[in-house]
């Protein structure tokens, strides 16, 4: 699948490790930068680019990094059709997709170790929305909120 990827300076050190991990799983990375370490770059720029790729169907899922994962998540969720969340444990990375159809995972590179980040990426990318009726109903209600906004 196509996986949109973006990071600000807060996640830049983790970028190569995760891009390699995604590619090693057979996916194609749509790289939205940052392309070099710039301590004054801004996470919303990368979050918007990744979110639009997912929203417009250029990528099936997205991965965003920042220092905490929080800013990237807040910014990405402003784009219609995006369901982004910080996930720093395996259960959330899997259940977020299976139950909530999360399409962007946000990781805090200042918080988690590289091996955990790689594991979370593997879990997130392999998980699929369950399609179970109650989850579809809840997802529909989430989409209704977005449509009312
Ligand atoms: C940047 O220094 C930092 O604030 C950003 O990467 C992120 O953690 C925001 O949530």
Image (cartoon, grey):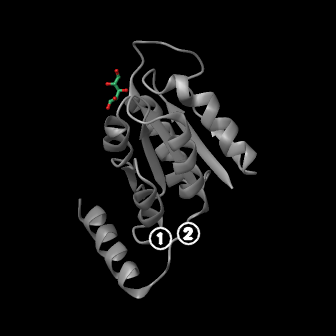
Residue identified by numbered label 1: 98
On screen, residue 23 versus residue 132, left or right, reads: right
Q: Position of residue 123 (x, y in %)?
A: 55, 57
Categorize mark 1 by other alpha carbons within 10 Å: few (<14), some (14-19), many (20+): some
- Which quadrant of the picture is home to ligand 1? top left
Q: Position of residue 92 (x, y in %)?
A: 40, 59
The answer to whether residue 49 is above or below residue 35 is below
Categorize mark 2 by other alpha carbons within 10 Å: few (<14), some (14-19), many (20+): some
Residue identified by numbered label 2: 128
Could you tell me if the residues under marks 2 and 1 are in contact, i.e. CB atoms within 8 Å?
yes
Q: Position of residue 134 (x, y in %)?
A: 35, 84
Q: Residue at x 45, y 20 (%)?
A: 9
Mark 2 or mark 1: whose residue is earlier in sequence: 1
Q: Nearer the viewer, residue 115 or 5?
A: 115
The answer to whether residue 26 is above or below residue 131 is above
Report which quarter residue 32 is drawn in. Answer: top right
Q: Residue at x 43, y 66 (%)?
A: 95
Q: Position of residue 53 (x, y in %)?
A: 55, 46
In the rendered image, which quarter contains the C terminus? bottom left
Mark 1 lies on a secondary structure that is helix
Q: Is mark 1 within 8 Å of ligand 1?
A: no
The answer to whether residue 135 is above or below residue 79 is below
- Give how far apart the Cα atoms at labels 2 and 1 are: 5 Å
Disc tally is 2
Mark 2 lies on a secondary structure that is loop
């Amino acid at each position: 699948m196509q996986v949109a990827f973006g990071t600000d300076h807060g996640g830049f050190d983790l970028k190569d490790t995760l891009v390699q991990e995604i590619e090693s799983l057979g996916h194609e990375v749509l790289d939205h930068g940052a392309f070099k370490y710039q301590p004054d770059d801004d996470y919303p720029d990368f979050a918007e680019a990744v979110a639009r790729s997912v929203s417009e169907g250029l990528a099936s899922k997205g991965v965003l990094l920042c220092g905490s994962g929080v800013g990237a998540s807040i910014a990405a969720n402003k784009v219609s059709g995006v369901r982004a969340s910080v996930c720093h444990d395996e259960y959330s990375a899997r259940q977020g997709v299976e139950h909530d159809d999360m399409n962007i995972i946000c990781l805090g590179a200042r918080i988690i170790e590289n091996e955990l980040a790689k594991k979370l990426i593997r879990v997130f990318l392999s998980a699929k929305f369950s399609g179970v009726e109650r989850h579809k109903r809840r997802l529909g209600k989430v989409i209704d909120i977005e449509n009312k906004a």
